[in-house]
Image (spheres, rainbow, N blue to C red):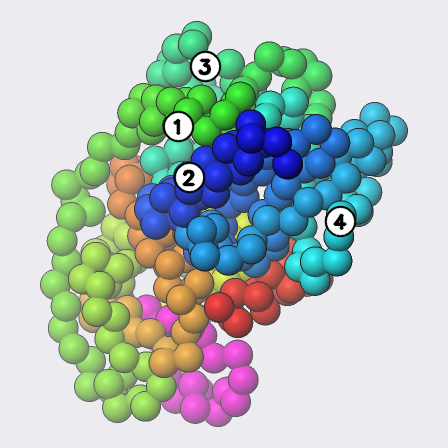
Amino acid sequence: MNNITHTLQATVIKYCSTIGRDPLLVQGAGGNVSWKDDDTLWIKASGTWLVDAETKDIFIPVDLNDLRLEIAKRNFYAIPKVIGDSKLRPSIETLLHALLPHKVVVHLHAVEILAHLVRANYVAVFKQLIDGSIKWCSVDYFKPGAELAEEVAASLLRQPDANVVFLQNHGVVIGGGGVSDIEIILQKLITLLKNNMDPLLMGGSISVSPSLLQSQNYILCSDPEVNQLATNRYLSSRLEREWVLYPDHAVFLGDRAAIVGRTINLADLDAVSTNKPAFLFDVDTGVYISKSATTAQKVQLRCYYDVLIRQPVTEKLVALPPASIAELLDWDAEKYRQTKCTEL
């Protein structure tokens, strides 16, 4: 490894650790980062956390030439060839990173941007807010992995100079010659796309529910803001109709919210021996967390709150359809990622 490559690697790893500590940019195992070293693509391993970049081996080298050959043949289902004997799996989005020609590629679920991407009219809004210094394209929602990579490839053919790709109901992909390029573009996007907080979404009182506290498996959420998902009527009204807004939400929080008295009855809870909900939403009372809830689930619920708090109360959001949610939940690649997150 030459000095230039070593410097790039060290810079990328430090950057990953930094952004991994910011929940408005990275949530648990979400997002992925890569850099290209001649014929090798170094990509984050599935289920690993960017915040651990400086303390754990979270990147895997894969054969970049082979991926480019497969992409040229439009084989977006190609399995990345791992170089070496790592037992980890490359990110689900490895082909997405190989598609972009940039030295460094970063894919994030940045909340300020994601809050727009779950709205139907985000493309028109972005055309007004983003100036010509950023070359961008966008794609509709597609299942992560091969389907998404194919659509991004088509979009990049139409706009080959794009260094930003917006993914509806998913996140943003940014390419640059180095980390400094990524930082500049990301900060500019966050500034241009910053959302105003609707005053109607601020605040919400908590009243303890004895019936819930008697459960040995759930405790009242200690985060007063997350509790607003149940105590603020504008936020709680979205729990049923706008629950799954992006893939990681489905993967870690399931296909529906467990709303006490509406989608789940407390009398039936003890009869469920497995797969109990990680969270119970008792409207007008608070959010209750299972003692077995994982850190990955907790950060995803906080992300959901962070996205909702940035929505005008009159804004209708685009939730993922049941068929798309079912695809995610029945996907071996996502089941593997869940397992890795449980181990952390």
How far is the residue under mark 1 from the one under mark 4?
28 Å
Q: CA distance from mark 3 to mark 4?
A: 33 Å
Numbered badge on residue 183: 1
Give the residue type that dot 3 points to: Ile
Asked if residue 202 lies left or right of residue 141, the reply is: left
Question: Label 3's element?
Answer: loop
Q: Which residue is mark 4?
A: 82
Q: Vertical placement of 306 versus 289: above or below? A: above
Instruction: Tell me which label, 3 or 2, sits earlier in the chain.
Output: 2
Q: Residue at x 64, y 36 (%)?
A: 1
Three-letter amino acid code at the position of disc 4: Val
Give the camera-side residue of 63 and 202. 63
Q: Amino acid at mark 1?
A: Glu
Magenta stretch contains residue 84: no
Residue 278 on the magenta segment? yes
Q: Please report contact status of discs 1 and 2: CB closer than 8 Å, yes or no.
A: yes
Q: CA distance from mark 3 to mark 1?
A: 13 Å
Residue 273 placed where, x, y %? 52, 89
Ranked by sequence position, the earlier of labels 3 and 1 is 3
At label 2, counting other C-alpha atoms closer than 10 Å, the crowd grade (few under 14, some 14-19, many 20 or more) is: many
Q: Which mark is residue 50?
A: none
Label 1 or label 4, whichever comes before in sequence order = 4
The nearer-to-camera label among 1 and 4 is: 4
The residue segment tinted magenta is 266-283
Label 3 and label 2: CA atoms lie apart by 21 Å
Point out the tag, 1 or 2, that comes first from the N-terminus. Answer: 2
Q: Residues within 10 Å of mark 4 (few under 14, many from 20)?
A: some
- Please name the residue that numbered disc 3 is placed on: 134
Crowdedness of circle 1 by 10 Å Cα count: few (<14), some, many (20+)? Answer: some
**How far from the left and from the top, in percent, is residue 27?**
41, 52
